Image: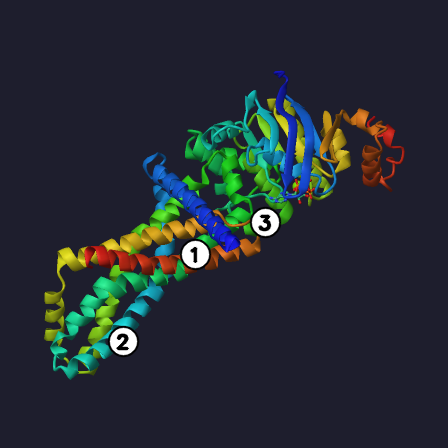
Amino acid sequence: MSEADRIQLEGIHLAFGSRQVYRNLDCRFPRGEISVLMGGSGAGKSTLLRLMAGLLRPDRGRVVVAGEEITSLSERDLFRMRERIGMLFQGGALLDAMTVFENVALPLREHSRLSETDIRAEVERRLVAVGLPDTGGLMPRELSGGMLRRAALARAIVTDPEILICDEPFSGLDPLNVRRIEALLIELNRRLGLTMIVTSHHLPSSLRMASQLVFLIDGGAVVGTPRELLASEDPRVREFLEAETAGMPGFEAVPGVAS
Amino acid sequence: MISALRTLGYRTVMLLEHLGHMAAFVGEIGLNLVRPPFRFGRLVMETFDVGVLSLAIVCLSGATVGAVLGLQGYNTLTRFGAEGSLGAVVGLTLVRELGPVFTALLVTGRAGSAMAAEIASMVTTEQLDGLRMMSIDPIDFVVTPKALAMVLVMPMLNALFILFAFFGGYVIGVQLLGVDGGTYVTSLENAITFEDDVAGTLLKSVVFGLLVGIIATYRGYTAEPTSAGVSAATTGTVVTASVTILIFDYVITALWGV
Ligand SMILES: Nc1ncnc2c1ncn2[C@@H]1O[C@H](COP(=O)(O)OP(=O)(O)OP(=O)(O)O)[C@@H](O)[C@H]1O
Ligand SMILES: [Mg+2]
């Protein structure tokens, strides 16, 4: 295995009952780069993220995170491994019995020795970064879907993890906030060298962010740079891209988009 | 015949597997009790929650049960001209039997079901997975404080139930039916011994608290991540815990004679 890859999936098989989600899937996520995971609804994007996080074990195959094979780790070792990872869940997964502030502060309270004042400052800084200043006192149920997702992102990045896994960070956001979150993710990647794995249906921002695109199709992964995939002859990739870009001015000639 | 045997065998294996999982779950809770961090803040919060949820219903039911006991006891005892023992009858039944059992059943219905529902909905909304991703063990952070709160609160609520029931019995027996107040209290005091009756009620309520705490958190923790899963965890908790309480009540009474 190469040190350049932060996360590696090898020969993954997974089925839920009779439904085969992955058939011998191979995929690598390079260190310090943003990979965007695409694919139709139900293609297995969220499930793949759960595999990388050790929340789910594959039926067969290896999952290697930062050089460590995690499919055979004990729960206790998984907790140690997860200190490297920040994860944004598709539904946010904020604790609904706590305020937004308490939620974002929780990883710091648990795993750092910061003083209360430092924690306050750090949490407020992250909330501002995701465009939610002065929401710390609210309960999660008082937030809209998009606000909830952004608060959850603040929680995922508050400890500056090496690896950031984001499930649909853009869905349900207005164009301004899509730009804001996109800029934030890119900035984190540039400044701290975070390895990022992002699932998204939002093609324009995916193309702008990604150094690697991963298409989940028919239980396998088609991997390439945005440029390569836009020029791809694979009919399944083309079909997906054309459906995504249909009717968007400037996107008709798909291969030219990446410029 | 063969197939019936096979079904029986399958059921037995399933039951054993279930009990095995539950034992592992209880082991995890035990481990988290002795291993730092100790989450006092969360324990206090949960204890407060369980207590506040159950307070009104326990006091009200206590007074009512005491009143009924006073009435029934009086009617029976007057037949033998023994209404002077009313305090003893009310006191002993309450302390040894009705107090711990009623309290546990009430707390199960009120706080136990709420506890299971809360954890189960945390499963459905991925809140527990969210904790795992922050390297926080949900059994340490969520389950253990809740289960322990049950054990702490049960004896307190039991004492409260018994207190209100004494009072209910007093109101009916003394104020309404005319038993002498001094006799009521003295016969109650004389009948109840510390090492047998009080220790017994304490033992029962602690055991029941443990059972309700474990069953409620286990059912919530292992719930299917759907709304049907949440409701199954809730009703399952009430049914399983109630039956288990009654069975253990018999076992404790038979073994220790309290
Ligand atoms: N716990 C589960 N039990 C059974 N089937 C599951 C489970 N989790 C996922 N699946 C199935 O696995 C497939 C992949 O699900 P997944 O949630 O990963 O899709 P997705 O690509 O994230 O879709 P979306 O874009 O809608 O979020 C789906 O067909 C789903 O039915
Ligand atoms: Mg998904």
Question: How dense is the environment of label 3, judged by Cα within 10 Å: few (below 14), some, or many (20 and up)?
Answer: some
Q: Amino acid at mark 1?
A: Thr
Q: Position of residue A59 (x, y in %)?
A: 60, 34
Report helix, strand or loop for mark 3. Answer: loop
Q: How is the image coloured?
A: rainbow
Callout 1 touching callout 2 (CB < 8 Å): no
Foreground tag (1 vs 3): 1
Residue A102 shows in the view? yes
Question: How dense is the environment of label 1, judged by Cα within 10 Å: few (below 14), some, or many (20 and up)?
Answer: many
Q: Residue furthest right?
A: A253
Which image quadrant is residue A183 in? top right
Residues at marks 3 and 2, CA–CA distance in whole angstroms: 50 Å
Specify the subunit that label 3 lies on.
Answer: A
Question: How dense is the environment of label 2, judged by Cα within 10 Å: few (below 14), some, or many (20 and up)?
Answer: some
Q: Which residue is mark 2?
A: B68
Q: Which residue is mark 1?
A: B237
Q: Nearer the viewer, residue A203 or B6?
A: B6
Specify the subunit that label 2 lies on.
Answer: B
Foreground tag (3 vs 2): 2
Q: Which residue is mark 3?
A: A143
Q: Amino acid at mark 3?
A: Leu
Foreground tag (1 vs 2): 1
